[in-house]
Amino acid sequence: MPRRNRPGRGRPDSGERPDAGAVSGWARSESGPDGDWLVRTVPGSQAAKTYRCPGCDHEIRPGVPHLVVWPADETGGVADRRHWHRPCWEARARRRPNRRW
């Protein structure tokens, strides 16, 4: 049986305020000892550029699935986003911040 669309749910014209997930491309919120974050998964098929992971200081090459993370309370936008390897993001509380010498 086909799925029914529910009128007005999450649509901008319904009078509801879109949540952060709708605005940021389906981000989820995470809370930790280091604050509140919005986290979006980037599948390998959509990873088209090279980024540097702040957790390990290694490159995230095109085609590699990873996470995009930014502060939940920040209104800055794109400049505040950081691309992380998933294991690096999950281990951020167990390691010291990485410094470039």
Image: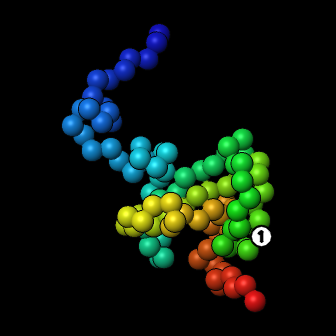
Residue 96 at x, y percent in the picture: 65, 84
Residue 88 at x, y percent in the picture: 68, 68
Q: Is residue 31 visible?
A: no
In the shown orientation, is residue 36 left or right of residue 61?
Answer: left
The residue tagged 1 is 58
Looking at the image, which residue sits at the far bottom?
Answer: 101
Residue 47 at x, y percent in the picture: 70, 48
Q: Is residue 93 visible?
A: yes
Q: Please state which of residues 11 and 9 is positioned toward the viewer in this rendering.
A: 11
Residue 73 at x, y percent in the picture: 37, 67
In the shown orientation, is residue 51 left or right of residue 12?
Answer: right
In the shown orientation, is residue 14 left or right of residue 52?
Answer: left
Q: Secondary structure at mark 1?
A: loop
Looking at the image, which residue sits at the far top?
Answer: 1
Task: Say above or below: 48 vs 29.
Answer: above
Residue at position x 35%, y 47% in the image: 19
Looking at the image, which residue sits at the far left?
Answer: 15
- Could you tell me the amino acid type at mark 1? His
Residue at position x 24%, y 40% in the image: 16
Residue at position x 66%, y 73% in the image: 54
> Pointer 1: residues within 10 angstroms few (<14), some, or many (20+)?
few
Task: Say above or below: 93 vs 18.
Answer: below
Question: Quarter of the image containing the C terminus?
Answer: bottom right
